[in-house]
């Protein structure tokens, strides 16, 4: 029942049984959770359950941000003669999917969903608290860029296909542009002139918008952690979800720095440092400056 309804829906809101209007993300989440329980292939025997589950998962990802909601509303609001219907992507048989929601069992899916919720809460707490807003925007940009490179690297190693999570300059579209420019270079009287056609991938103006950058970072970190068991800030791949839970201090970089400076990782006590329990905010503010300085060297080490 639910499967047919989801697959017949003409937009992401309808897929999650939501009215076509901006809605609190918590509501999106609860609808997603309820529908996931109904159509997850582990729970539902209908032949197209997997397709429906994919469709609601994509809808959830999209509607999890106000930016994504606004975009879907604009698309859905277009006159019907234009028929701008966002069709659910039908997974091809041989397509190797790698989304955080692709799991073998319902239990694993639930675990990942919970993990994603924790990640989201942690990121919002860290980056949307209004502390040094300009600084965190810059930092978020750096994290997004670094996470994109890690996703590409790990996806490639795992033999996964090109993904929208990869750095834009690594996509086929970017290679096409480069090819065009290379051709132009051969005919241009001034060799440098064609370079101006190349987009500036460092600019990424959209990442100056904190909600957009935050959503992107959330998707990237969720992918790295759920699909690859990789923590960007530990800089390593864990053997299992449990291993990660036990040894990685958290989702944000600050949690890692706090854990290190307090001599704590997770709940275990490691060789104690001289620092006593610090106020997390104090520690955060102190770490902010230290991070800025070591950021450069760190990023070089972490990726590539
Ligand atoms: Zn970690």
Image: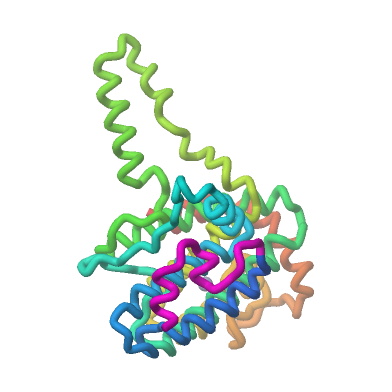
Q: Quadrant of residue 173?
A: top left
Q: Does 45 appear above or below 177?
A: below
Q: Does 175 appear above or below 142?
A: above
Question: What percent of the width, then of the height, locates residue 212?
Answer: 59, 53
Q: Does 195 appear above or below 215?
A: above
Front in this rendered view, residue 179 or 90: 90
Question: What percent of the width, then of the height, locates residue 210?
Answer: 65, 52
Which residue lies at the image location 28% right of the left edge and 59% below the top edge?
161
Q: In this view, does 300 lie to the left or right of 249?
A: left
Check if residue 16 falls in the magenta segment: yes
Q: Does 127 appear above or below 245?
A: above
Q: In which quarter of the image is residue 28?
A: bottom right
Q: Is residue 69 left or right of residue 83?
A: right
Q: Is residue 126 left or right of residue 172?
A: right
Which residue lies at the image location 51% right of the left edge and 79% below the top edge?
113
Question: What percent of the width, then of the height, locates residue 197?
Answer: 40, 25
The N terminus: image quadrant: bottom left
Count of residue discs:
0
Which residue lies at the image location 34% right of the left edge and 84% below the top edge?
104
Front in this rendered view, residue 99 or 7: 7
Check if residue 245 falls in the magenta segment: no
Outermost residue toward the top? 189
Q: Which colour scheme is used?
A: rainbow
The part of the chain drawn in magenta is 1-22
Q: Quadrant of residue 70?
A: bottom right
Residue 263 visible in the displayed image: yes
Which residue lies at the image location 67% right of the left edge and 54% below the top edge?
136
Residue 224 visible in the displayed image: no
């Amino acid at each position: 029942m639910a499967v047919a309804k989801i697959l017949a829906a003409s937009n992401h809101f309808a897929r999650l049984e939501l009215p076509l209007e901006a809605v609190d993300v918590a509501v999106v989440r609860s609808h997603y959770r309820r529908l996931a329980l109904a159509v997850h292939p582990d729970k539902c025997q209908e032949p197209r359950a997997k397709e429906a589950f994919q469709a609601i998962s994509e809808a959830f990802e999209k509607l999890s941000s106000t930016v994504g909601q606004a975009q879907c509303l604009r698309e859905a609001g277009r006159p019907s003669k234009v028929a701008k219907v966002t069709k659910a992507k039908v997974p091809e048989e041989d397509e190797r999917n790698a989304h955080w929601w692709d799991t073998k069992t319902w239990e694993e899916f639930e675990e990942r969903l919970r993990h994603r919720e924790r990640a989201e809460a942690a990121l919002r707490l860290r980056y949307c608290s209004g502390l040094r807003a300009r600084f965190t925007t810059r930092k978020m940009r750096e994290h997004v860029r670094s996470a994109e490179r890690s996703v590409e690297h790990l996806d490639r190693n795992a033999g996964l296909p090109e993904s929208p999570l990869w750095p834009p300059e690594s996509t086929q579209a970017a290679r096409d542009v480069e090819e065009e420019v290379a051709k132009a270079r051969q005919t241009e009287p001034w060799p440098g002139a064609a370079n101006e056609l190349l987009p500036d991938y460092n600019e990424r103006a959209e990442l100056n918008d904190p909600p957009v950058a935050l959503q992107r970072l959330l998707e990237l970190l969720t992918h790295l952690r759920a699909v690859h068991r990789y923590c960007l800030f530990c800089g390593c791949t864990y053997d299992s979800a449990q291993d990660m839970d036990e040894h990685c201090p958290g989702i944000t970089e600050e949690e890692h720095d706090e854990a290190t400076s307090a001599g704590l990782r997770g709940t275990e006590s490691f060789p104690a440092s001289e620092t006593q329990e610090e106020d997390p905010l104090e520690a955060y503010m102190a770490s902010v400056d230290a991070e800025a300085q070591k950021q450069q060297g760190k990023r070089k080490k972490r990726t590539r």
